[in-house]
Image: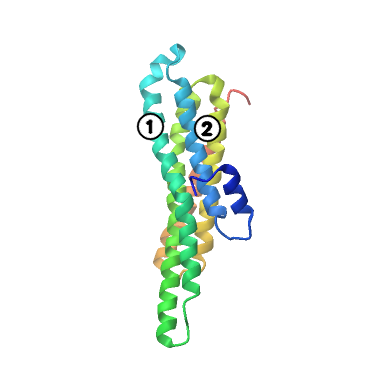
Amino acid sequence: MKNMTINEFAKIVASESPVPGGGSVGALCGALSAALAEMVANLTLGKKKYADSKEEMTDIASKAALLREKLLNYIEEDSLAYNKVMEAYKLPKETEEEKSIRLAEIEKGLKTAASVPLKVAETSFEIFPLAEAVVLKGNLSSVTDALVGVMMARTGILSALLNIRINLQSIKDEEFVNILKEKADILEEKTINYEQKILELSPFK
């Protein structure tokens, strides 16, 4: 999916197919967030005014590029995880053995479907310190691009947390559910606070 044009991707999202859906779109938001942080770092490099930040901006651009690529790959991974759940629900359930196998595969699929968005959320959260740095030390003429990236990271994270929670509702493994629920709750609070902290740095308030 990452190799589709924007138009192709938007069309397939808009279609009657349930995938790609909110999870994949959330991963795309995270990827675009990383891209914006990377862009501002690159626009800062080579400018005499920001010579003291050269080493830091080079590091930020490199880290953001890695996060961007990871999140682009999660677009596809999220859709594949959803498909696995749907395939499990279609398994035969005539005999007790078939029912048992089907339920086990559904549980397995749901755990994957909850785990992929956790990776999206955690990876998107890694963008915040990069974005904060380019807001503080990057090219001032591009600071609003970095701030848009912050908001995109927030959207990527919170959308992923929604997908975690909807899948947790159907998972029977209480320990697994409690662990992911706690991670999601903590990450949501940290995300909201970190986003606000960075947005407060805007010179254009």
Identify the residue at horizontal 59%, vertical 60% (top origin).
Answer: 17
Name of the residue lying farthest toward the bottom: 95
Identify the residue at horizontal 45%, vertical 26% (top origin).
Answer: 41
Q: Is residue 56 above or below residue 121?
A: above
Q: Is residue 47 above or below residue 60?
A: above
Callout 1 secondary element: helix
Q: Position of residue 25 (x, y in %)?
A: 55, 49
Task: Identify which residue, 111 or 83, lies in the foreground.
Answer: 83
The quadrant in which residue 18 appears is bottom right
Res. 27 visible in picture: yes
Identify the residue at horizontal 54%, vertical 43% (top origin).
Answer: 29
Task: Identify which residue, 165 or 1, lies in the foreground.
Answer: 1
Q: Position of residue 75 (x, y in %)?
A: 48, 50
In primary-sequence order, the first of circles 1 and 2 is 1
**Could you tell me how far apart the alpha carbons at marks 1 and 2 are, in whole angstroms?**
21 Å
Q: Is residue 33 above or below residue 182?
A: above
Q: Amino acid at mark 1?
A: Ser
Q: Is residue 70 left or right of residue 197?
A: left
Q: Position of residue 174 (x, y in %)?
A: 42, 68
Categorize mark 2 by other alpha carbons within 10 Å: few (<14), some (14-19), many (20+): many
Where residue 198 is drawn, which disc sits there?
Answer: 2
Q: Is residue 128 above or below residue 99?
A: above
Find disc 1 in the rendering and name its residue.
62
Where residue 186 is drawn, which disc sits there?
Answer: none
Q: Position of residue 129 (x, y in %)?
A: 44, 34
Mark 1 or mark 2, whichever is nearer to me: 1
Identify the residue at horizontal 50%, vertical 63% (top origin).
Answer: 167
